[in-house]
Image (cartoon, helix red, strand yellow):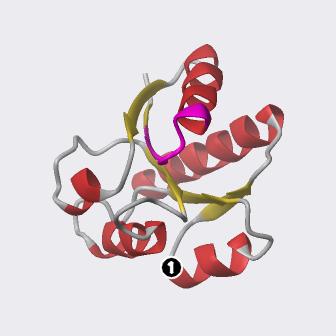
Amino acid sequence: MKQIIIADDDPGIREVFEIILNRAGYEVKMYPNGEALLNNEFVPPDLFIIDKQLSGVDGLEVCRYLKEYNLTKNIPVLMTSASPYVAAFATEAGADGFIEKPFKIKTVIELIEKYLNNSVLNNIN
């Protein structure tokens, strides 16, 4: 079962992600902020979903760290934000993709599957 780590300080958003991703067959690990990720207190997942506006530490900083860290640099990172500029923020931080809030469940699942499939193909080549 593919594992996805979600870092979002909004409990409602975490719950929505957990419900839709569990129903889609993914194992989900939730974090209310980015501290554990910056301190390497996690088992590397197959994909990260990081909110731009985390409490305590900026989600963009977490993304940059994950993309520079040897153990996680090849793991897809999707940034989420209600900002209409999420694409630019995500690209600048090195994210593989982005999810603009509010989001459609189908769009989220398709995006996750796209990056998980690309990740598998990249590891084979």
- Horizontal side of residue 124 vs 56, given as left or right: right
Q: Position of residue 47 (x, y in %)?
A: 46, 46
- Secondary structure beneath label 1: helix
- Residue at 37 percent across and 67 percent down: it is 62
Residue 125 visible to the viewer: no
Q: Verify whether residue 83 appears in magenta.
A: no
Image vertical order of residue 106 relative to residue 46, above or below: above
Other residues around mark 1 within 10 Å, as few (<14) / some (14–19) / many (≥20): some
Q: Verify whether residue 7 appears in magenta.
A: yes
Q: Quadrant of residue 57?
A: bottom left
Image quadrant holding the C terminus, namely bottom left
The residue that mark 1 highlights is 93
| Numbered range of the magenta stretch | 5-12
Image vertical order of residue 61 relative to residue 79, above or below: below
* Number of numbered discs: 1
Q: Nearer the viewer, residue 119 or 54?
A: 54
- Residue at 39 percent across and 62 percent down: it is 74
Q: Quadrant of residue 64?
A: bottom left
Q: Position of residue 40 (x, y in %)?
A: 17, 55
- Residue at 46 percent across and 60 percent down: it is 54
- Horizontal side of residue 61 vs 76, given as left or right: left
What amino acid is labelled 1 in the image? Answer: Ala
